[in-house]
Amino acid sequence: MALFDKLGEMAKTVSEKANDSLETNKLISDINLTKGNIQVYQRELGEFYWAKFAVGEQLEEEAMLICDKIVAAQDKIRGLEAQIDQIKAESEARKAEREAEKAERKAAEKAAEAEQAAEKAGIEKDPVPVCAECGAVLTEGQKFCGSCGKPVA
Ligand SMILES: [Zn+2]
């Protein structure tokens, strides 16, 4: 009988401990939520004063100093953003330059190919007889150039 009582007592203690732990966790979670709310309210307070500063209202010296720090930080952000823009612009310029060079190389290759093809075609074709004097095309059996009248060699 004493053993059952003891076991019962132990079970009760375990369940009490679990309940206490659950309750404590709920409270801690509520504390953390409320701490988060405080940060939101503090930010709202800051924005309230910032809005006054932004329209040129005179604030207490300490508040003015904090607002000046915000202004300096905003300036810094603009400077950093300008640096990013410059890097982007330079990168785009380099890219355009590379593409222009590529197009130039391609055009040169094509011209070379066309030249080679023309040379090949010229070699393969029978040479057309022309007048040695004026370059006019001659027909077979012609004794004098039809254009300049010089005798055909
Ligand atoms: Zn001729």
Image (cartoon, rainbow, N blue to C red):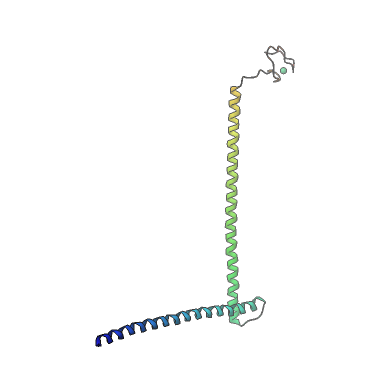
Q: Which quarter of the rendered picture does the C terminus lie within?
A: top right
Q: Quadrant of residue 46?
A: bottom right
Apparent side of residue 8 relative to residue 48 in the rendered image (left or right): left
Measured from the top left, where is residue 68 in percent x and y?
A: 60, 75
Residue at (59%, 64%) from the top-left corner? 79
Measured from the top left, where is residue 58 in percent x and y?
A: 65, 81
**Residue 75 in the image: above or below residue 52:** above
Apparent side of residue 1 relative to residue 123 in the rendered image (left or right): left
Residue at (59%, 46%) from the top-left corner? 99
Q: Quadrant of residue 146?
A: top right
Q: Quadrant of residue 28?
A: bottom left
Measured from the top left, where is residue 26 in percent x and y?
A: 44, 81
Ligand 1 quadrant?
top right
Q: Residue furthest front?
A: 1
Measured from the top left, where is residue 36 in percent x and y?
A: 51, 78
Q: Closest to the observer: 28 or 144? A: 28
Q: Which quarter of the rendered picture does the N terminus lie within?
A: bottom left
Residue at (35%, 82%) from the top-left corner? 15
